[in-house]
Image (spheres, helix red, strand yellow):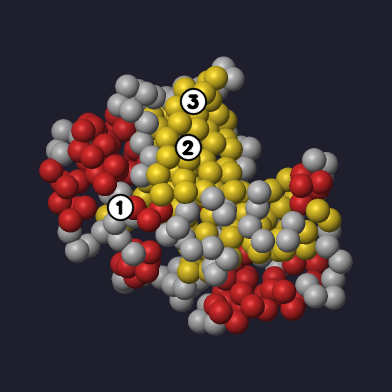
Amino acid sequence: MYPNRALCRFSVAGASARLGYLRDGQLYDLSALGDPAFASLSAWLTAASGRATEALAALDEAVAARAPVGDLERLLAGDCRLLAPIDAQEVWACGVTYEMSRSARMRESREPTIYEKVYDAERPEIFFKATPHRVVGPGEAVGIRGDSSWDVPEAELTLLITPALEIVGYTVGNDMSSRSIEGENPLYLPQAKLYDRACALGPVVCLAGEVDPLDLAVTCIIERDDERVFEGATHTRQIHRSLEELVAYLGRCNTFPAGAWVMTGTGVVPPDTFTLRHGDVVHVTFSGLGTLTNPVIEMPVD
């Protein structure tokens, strides 16, 4: 199930990426309009910057006289595929925004008190997560590091923001994490979080106003050899900080010419005895946003 109104990036028969608009199950090719503002996700975010409400409302008008490419579900059964909804955006992530995340990171760490302090502090934890080439989309493999012994997915509501820091959309995010590396030393956080295939986004970008982002049920299911080995659930109402606060702190002394993605933390944490393996499949679902499914591969050290 997809949102009633959403943006996406898609490709047909392996051709170049297109910017799409999904409305009531029908896919429209925005790139085919010939308007520079719809040439790419970056172009749309730049054009929408400072006027997000108007830009969101204008999408219906832009396709009013256009025929859709077709029904998205039928297209995906053919030679159309959804791509990661990112082209030139950076991905940033926020940590310790759920009580569950605070507890889990305190258990894994040799310096547990720092996570308790972050949870209660005025300033949130924000870190750089991924460049576009490190991000995978629906159906593509996420990675676990070959030099890590304890790896987990993290289901996260992920915000799309314009260069003016306006929240214009939401997608499903999987913030892959090496708990063994981060637990060894908090200063190893970049190595635990930032590597090839360490971030998955998709399947589409639900437009702001279509859902209440703090009223979404979240599930994470992991399958191994066609058997369910983990299932966890949470709810976005349990996020400890406001979404606007997280974005505002990210924007301090910082600019995003192509917009950015902001992951907002996880409230679903597998037990400490669990680690991902090569061949597992991760399904992350947010009600109203859809399901992001990715197989798991081990990334070689060399």
Question: Number of numbered discs present?
Answer: 3
Q: Residue at x 57, y 17 (%)?
A: 225
Q: Can you say whether 118 is above or below 244 in the image?
A: above
Closer to the observer: label 1 or label 3? Answer: 1
Whether the residues at callouts 1 and 2 have beta carbons within 8 Å, the answer is no
Nearest to N terminus: mark 3 or mark 2: 2
Q: Which disc number belongs to residue 122?
A: none
- Distance of label 1 from label 2 (alpha carbons): 17 Å
- Distance of label 3 from label 2 (alpha carbons): 20 Å
Residue named by callout 2? 220
Q: Residue at x 48, y 63 (%)?
A: 212
Q: Is residue 35 visible?
A: no
Nearest to N terminus: mark 1 or mark 2: 1
Q: Position of residue 28 (x, y in %)?
A: 78, 63
- Distance of label 1 from label 3 (alpha carbons): 28 Å
Q: Crowdedness of circle 3 by 10 Å Cα count: few (<14), some, many (20+)?
A: some
Residue named by callout 3? 298
Side of 61 relative to 300 (left or right): right
Closer to the observer: label 3 or label 2? Answer: 2
In which quarter of the view is residue 208 placed? bottom right
Q: Position of residue 32 (x, y in %)?
A: 80, 67
Q: Which disc number belongs to residue 97?
A: 1
Of residue 5 and residue 293, the one placed in the foreground of this image is 5
